[in-house]
Amino acid sequence: MRFATRWPKALGTPSRVTYACEHESRNIDRQGTESLRRWVRNQHRSIKDWRRRSSGQKPASTRMDGF
């Protein structure tokens, strides 16, 4: 029981901690999805450009990228 009594001092109540995490992740989801989409679009564009640039090389070199 000693461990149980130590909990509130370290973290506040466990329920409050989990709530804070959930609230934080929800905010990130709301704001992040749009920017993430934009980021993904940019990534794809840069990959296409990079492929176009390195099209003269062997296909093995593009495989290193993981795509």
Image (cartoon, rainbow, N blue to C red):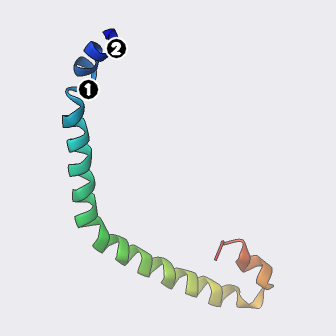
- Judge left or right: residue 44 versus residue 1: right
Residue 55, above or below 14: below
User: What is the CA distance from the residue labelled 2 to the residue labelled 1?
Assistant: 13 Å
The x, y position of residue 18, in whole percent, is 25, 40
Residue 16, above or below 45: above
Label 2: which secondary element: helix
Name, please, the residue furthest toward the top.
2
Residue 31, above or below 47: above
Marks 2 and 1, the one that precedes in the sequence: 2
Q: Quadrant where the N terminus lies?
A: top left
Residue 64, quarter of picture: bottom right
Could you say which disc has been placed on residue 11 in the image? Answer: 1
| Residue located at (23% from left, 57% from top) | 26
Mark 1 is on which residue type? Leu
| Residue located at (26% from left, 13% from top) | 5
Which-is-in-front pick, marks 2 and 1?
2
Marks counted in the figure total: 2
Name, please, the residue furthest toward the front.
1
The x, y position of residue 35, in whole percent, is 31, 71
Q: Quadrant where the C terminus lies?
A: bottom right
Judging by the rendered image, the residue that carries numbered circle 2 is: 3
Could you say which disc has been placed on residue 55 in the image? Answer: none
Label 1: which secondary element: helix
Q: Residues within 10 Å of mark 1 (few under 14, many from 20)?
A: few
| Residue located at (49% from left, 85% from top) | 45
Residue 4, quarter of picture: top left
| Residue located at (20% from left, 50% from top) | 23
